[in-house]
Image: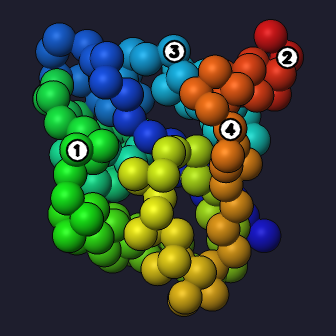
Amino acid sequence: MKSIALIACSKTKNKKPCCAKELYTGDKFKKSRRYVEKVHDEWFILSALHGLVRPDEIIEPYDYTLKTAKKAEKEKWSQEVYSELKNYIDNKYEVYIYAGDDYRKYLLPLLEKDGYKVKVPMKGLSQGHQNSWLKKQLGE
């Protein structure tokens, strides 16, 4: 079974448009990227502004987060991400989500309802513990 990873964007970004995998400069994003490139078949970025983003997609810096978004906005965002994701995978994929609750709360049920196997390896871990988990997985 193939695996696909979804990782959260980061607040800190490069100042100029570039490919998404280079745009986000946060420490957790960089660790997540290195980890998912190592262990998963494919990966995408969950962007608060752009939804599902391919790592090589060119995007401009922005300042937007789902943390302050209303429930209806998060639900709409999740539906759009899910609709886009279905263009790339079928339910023979295992989906791994490396993102906080704001990014997965409404997306996870959509995936599970359609029969996708979904795993959230860092579920329940604080930000600091997530970084520690990633460091351990990377052998750092």
The numbered mark, 2 or 1, whose residue comes first in the sequence reads 1
Binning the other alpha carbons within 10 Å of mark 3 as few (below 14), some (14 to 19) or many (20 upward) gives few
Answer with mark 1 or mark 4, whichever residue precedes in sequence: 1
Q: What element carries label 1?
A: loop
Q: Is residue 48 visible?
A: no
In the rendering, at what x and y percent does residue 59 appear? Answer: 19, 34
N-term-proximal mark, 3 vs 2: 3
Q: Which of marks 3 and 2 is in front?
A: 3
Q: Distance between the Cα atoms at labels 1 and 3?
A: 22 Å
Between the C-alphas of marks 3 and 2, the distance is 16 Å
How far is the residue under mark 3 from the one under mark 4?
A: 16 Å
**In percent of the image, x 75 and y 41: which residue is there?**
39
Q: Which amino acid does label 2 sit on?
A: Gly
Disc 2 designates what residue?
139
Label 2 with label 4: CB-CB less than 8 Å = no
Q: Quadrant of the N terminus?
A: bottom right
Whichever of callouts 3 and 4 sits on the residue coming sooner in the sequence is 3
Residue 27: give its label. Answer: 3
Distance from Cα at disc 2 to Cα at disc 1: 34 Å
Between the C-alphas of marks 1 and 4, the distance is 21 Å
Task: Tell me the amino acid under the disc marked 4.
Answer: Leu
* Residue at image location 67% in from the left, 55% down from the top: 120
